[in-house]
Amino acid sequence: MRMSDLISAASILPALKASSKKQVLQEMCATAALNCGLPEREILYTITQRERVGSTGAGNGVAIPHGKFAKLNRIVGVFARLEKPVDYDSPDGAPVDLVFMLLAPEGAGADHLKALSRVARLLRDPDVTAKLRATKDTDGLYVLMTQDAKPFAA
């Protein structure tokens, strides 16, 4: 699975202004709705229900909110680089400034896990996160996230 299978340049928010986790999720769900055709409210509801189970903050300023949707036919990603970090209830207590949201079809069990693993692996790399934090334009962020053309097998 390639990162280019998960995200398009149209799904990148290079300088999201938000003051809370809720606002970050609302803005990202609005972008997701434009890119996948699902209603924004349905996406937000599913994502916030998942957050109630436990924070999707991954540590080191990264969060990977995700959810499954009955009417979705492909995995869709949305990436946001926040202008200012926000409290995200992450296990390490650190505020978050890099957020990669994943929406998956309900029946995408293994593919959903592969996508989550692929995103987590990318955002766990300190060199990659440093470059993402330093890059302020959509095209640059897209290139950074998709430059590894090798497929990832979980």
Image (tube, grey):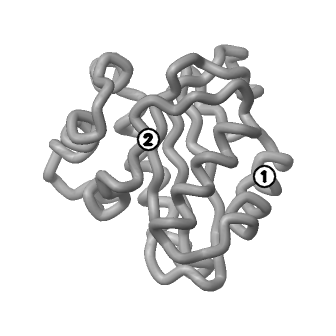
Q: What crowding class fits label 1: few (fewer than 14 Cα within 10 Å), some (14-19), or many (20 or more)? A: some
How many dots with numbers? 2
Vertical position of residue 16 compared to residue 48: above or below: above
Looking at the image, which residue is at 31% across and 57% down? 8
Any mark on residue 13, and which? 2
Does residue 50 appear left or right of residue 85 in this picture?
right
Q: Label 2 sits on what residue type?
A: Leu
Q: In what quadrant of the picture does the N terminus appear?
A: bottom left
Q: Nearer the viewer, residue 71 or 68?
A: 71
Q: Which residue is mark 1?
A: 48
Asked where in the image residue 106 lies, by quadrant, the reply is bottom right
Q: Is residue 10 visible?
A: yes
Any mark on residue 7, and which? none
Image location (x, y in percent) of residue 23: 71, 38
Q: Secondary structure at mark 1?
A: helix
Image location (x, y in percent) of residue 35: 45, 67
Asked where in the image residue 20 lies, by quadrant, the reply is top right
Looking at the image, which residue is at 54% across and 24% down? 97
Asked whether the residues under the numbered discs 2 and 1 touch, taking CB atoms below 8 Å apart as contact, a structural biologist would say no
